[in-house]
Image: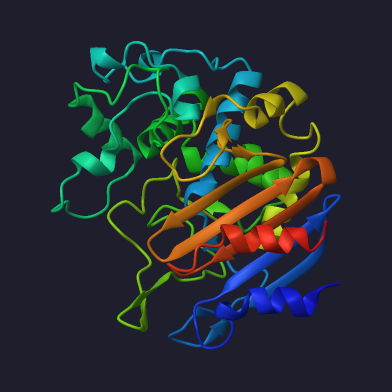
Amino acid sequence: MPIAAIDHLMQAYQGEVPGASLLVLKNGLPLLTRSYGRADLSVGEDVSARSNFRLASVSKQFTAAAVLLLAQAGKLTIDDPVRKWLPALPQEANAITLRHLLTHTSGLIDYEDVMGANWQGQIRDAGVLQLLTREHRLYFQPGHGYRYSNSGYALLALIVERASGKTYPDFLRERIFQPLGMHDTLAFVAGGPAVPHRAWGYSNIDGHWQRTDQSTTSAVLGDGGIYSNIEDMAKWDAALYDDRLLTNASRALAFSPQVEVTGEGYVAQYGFGWRITGDTLWHSGETIGFRNVIVRWPAQHLSVVLLTNRNEPEPYQTALAIGRLFQ
């Protein structure tokens, strides 16, 4: 096993610095788990396989899975108009469907563009809806473009709640995390259950690592609010190969190219919560203090998960390089 080569690739995460958890899976089984650096610099706590990182936009695949589960149960359809579930949205949203939200083709305005610089406290998913009820413009007509949309996935979390009658964290826990044995994974809400084995987020500012764990947008759940670790992510990855959670038809929808990704600096297409590039399915996640990625080579039953509690470096290329060592 190429441990020395992997440790060389992961050199930046080693020592008294914010760290990383690395998982390599083959045929649903962990080939390699490695942990580097610190989960909490203030007390010198090491990162471990159970350290929980805020997944940021890696969360979107769970939101998409929740919608697909509700579609399997007949509670909604992928082509439902979004205003069927969120009638407070303005008339300009009439043509937007859940499929548009899932694939970033809705044209909805990004809530971060309309919050303003002086937003007090933290915005939540319901606050995103409130902002969008006052927006009578779209970036483009629904289905006629691609623009990555955190707004869309915040609205999907609210639709999960309305269609299921449960809170978004409860639905994920009862329908995804508990059945798969992902006991340390949760959609985190301040004042609710604590994040076990929490890794705190840091940013390198003027050459020094400073804790930057939360921002005004860190409480939005549907687009990025899930915490997990590599032990639980191994269980998630395994479930994506069979019918224990999603049917073959649902997985085909999630993993099939729905639209070409534009404006993001690389060639890819987008499914439901997944980017598709060549023979890989992947998604990255970036939020204040965290950078994460999951890359899957389904035909080879090979996956790499790299979770980090720091603002740099970007981990996608590192995960690809590690994956190549096992091919």
- On the rendered structure, is 206 left or right of 232? left
Residue 98 x/y as whole percent: 47, 21
Whether 91 is drawn above or below 270: the answer is above
Nearer to the camera, 56 or 178: 56
145 or 29: which is nearer to us? 145
Query: Which quadrant is home to the N terminus?
Result: bottom right
Q: Position of residue 7 (x, y in %)?
A: 70, 78
Location of the C terminus (image quadrant):
bottom right
The residue under the point 54% across, 58% down is 292
9 vs 83, nearest the viewer? 9
Q: Is residue 26 left or right of residue 22?
A: right
The residue lying at 31 percent from left, 36 percent from top is: 126
Res 140 quadrant in image: top left
Left or right: 73 as drawn, with respect to 89: right
Q: Is residue 228 visible?
A: no
Q: Position of residue 254 (x, y in %)?
A: 63, 30
Q: Residue furthest left?
A: 118
Determine which quarter of the picture holds residue 62. Answer: top right
- The answer to whether 217 is drawn above or below residue 113 in the figure is below
Q: Residue at x 63, y 40 (%)?
A: 277
Residue 53 visible: yes
Please say if 61 is above or below 292: above
